[in-house]
Image (cartoon, rainbow, N blue to C red):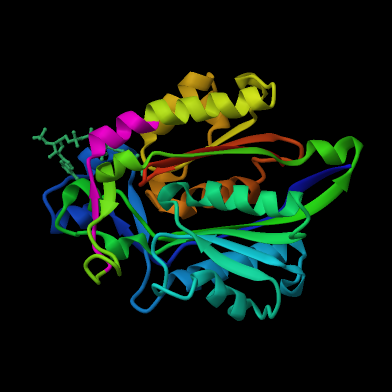
């Protein structure tokens, strides 16, 4: 008997406030033209004062549960990926759990920066496959703008806030059941590359949250090569070729990286979900937000093959193949 984690619902939430490139250009030495040309980003959403990561995650999760027709009491696992938790502890996932009215199950956070959602998906899928969970929320939620140095034009123009949630449900059986759901996940990290992308603070080092530091060009180089290899790995594992992929749902860091992955897979732009223009890089929220956008507007249809990928600080990177 095959057990699969089926995607039965998804939801997304973006804070109301939109910050355009033009607005940024009034504050720092940058231009709309540079940002669009080098990244594809035109705007980002920014959380309001007092609006926390758990608030964003809660709204995305409520929508996902409604769309899935699942009640909060049926959820027995919450895996929340974030780099910007409400507090150092407890896990932001437990705040979402309480707000959803759940009194059972397990809830915890995962830290893999921009790869966090793929890590969360892998964890929840494995819990489901071994029978330790039946219905899980996988959340990517960030108030990433809180850890930006707004005087560093090399990083502050790149990121935004948001949250995306996917509801996974165990399905067991034969025939078509075994073909739908999470087919495989592939996770990697290489701690030697710490200095390329990190935050210069933390509870154990400075006692402050710190700010994002990035060697952009180097991260770009790693992104292109590491994402290519993890995409190959995921296709090979499933004995599939790139032409089987219906949708590439990439991490939304830079349009040039997204285009490079699409070219490699020989996928036309119509088969690539791109939200980077409107959302910028929302770190762990970027993949679920993109996935939800394309499910919501009807582009992604049942039975289609989705290829998810992401790379982030650590370095961490990963991919997942999902039959929707
Ligand atoms: O989510 C985690 C994964 N993160 C990523 O995937 C990010 C990967 N990296 C990138 O997306 C790109 O490297 C960036 C968008 C961050 C930078 O683009 P780039 O083409 O690599 O530019 P660069 O860093 O080499 O900078 C080129 C020039 C520099 O000026 P000089 O030294 O040539 O005079 C920068 O100072 O552009 C300058 N620059 C800017 N100019 C206007 C850097 N940031 C800005 C800016 N506005 N915001």
Q: Residue at x 11, y 49 (%)?
A: 29
The image shows residue 14, relative to residue 90, as above or below, that is above
Relative horizontal placement of residue 254, taking residue 69 as reference (left or right): left
* Residue 310 highlighted magenta (yes or no): no
* Residue 210 highlighted magenta (yes or no): yes
- The image shows a total of numbered marks equal to 0
Image coords of residue 65 (percent x, y): 69, 65
Image coords of residue 259 (percent x, y): 42, 28
Relative horizontal placement of residue 74, taking residue 313 as reference (left or right): right
Viewport quadrant of the N terminus:
top right
Image coords of residue 72 (percent x, y): 71, 72
Residue in front for this viewpoint, 278 or 93: 93
Relative horizontal placement of residue 304, taking residue 83 as reference (left or right): right
Q: Magenta region: which residues?
A: 209-223
Q: Residue at x 68, y 49 (%)?
A: 126
The image shows residue 152, relative to residue 178, as above or below, that is below
The image shows residue 121, relative to residue 271, as above or below, that is below
Residue in front for this viewpoint, 78 or 188: 188
Based on the displayed image, in which of its 4 quarters is residue 142 positioned? bottom left
Residue 277 visible from this viewpoint: yes
Residue in front for this viewpoint, 320 or 35: 320
Q: Quadrant of ligand 1?
A: top left
């Amino acid at each position: 008997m095959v057990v699969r984690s089926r995607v039965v619902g998804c939801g997304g939430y973006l804070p109301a406030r939109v910050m355009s490139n033009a607005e940024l250009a009034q504050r720092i030495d940058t231009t709309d033209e540079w940002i669009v040309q080098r990244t594809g980003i035109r705007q980002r959403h920014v959380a309001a004062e007092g609006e926390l990561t758990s608030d964003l995650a809660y709204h995305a999760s409520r929508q996902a549960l409604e769309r899935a027709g699942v009640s909060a009491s049926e959820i027995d696992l919450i895996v929340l990926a974030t780099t910007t938790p409400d507090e150092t502890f407890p896990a932001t996932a437990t705040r979402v759990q309480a707000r959803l009215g759940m009194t059972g199950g397990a809830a915890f956070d995962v830290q893999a920066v921009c790869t966090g959602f793929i890590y969360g998906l892998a964890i929840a899928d494995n819990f489901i496959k071994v029978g330790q969970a039946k219905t899980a929320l996988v959340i990517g939620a960030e108030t990433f703008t809180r850890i930006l140095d707004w005087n560093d034009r090399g990083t502050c123009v790149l990121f935004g806030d948001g949250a995306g949630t996917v509801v996974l449900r165990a399905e067991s059986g034969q025939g078509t059941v075994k073909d739908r759901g999470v087919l495989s996940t592939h996770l990697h990290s290489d701690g030697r590359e710490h200095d390329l992308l990190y935050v210069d603070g933390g509870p154990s080092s400075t006692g402050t949250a710190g700010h994002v530091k990035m060697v952009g060009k180097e991260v770009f180089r790693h992104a292109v090569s590491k994402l290519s290899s993890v995409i190959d790995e995921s296709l090979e594992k499933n004995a599939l070729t790139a032409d089987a992929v219906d949708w590439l749902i990439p991490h939304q860091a830079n349009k040039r990286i997204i285009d490079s992955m699409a070219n490699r897979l020989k996928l036309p732009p119509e088969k690539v979900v791109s939200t980077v223009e409107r959302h910028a890089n929302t770190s762990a929220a970027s993949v679920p937000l993109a996935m939800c956008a394309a499910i919501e507007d009807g582009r992604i249809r049942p039975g289609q093959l989705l290829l998810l990928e992401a790379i982030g600080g650590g370095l961490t990177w990963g991919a997942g193949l999902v039959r929707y």
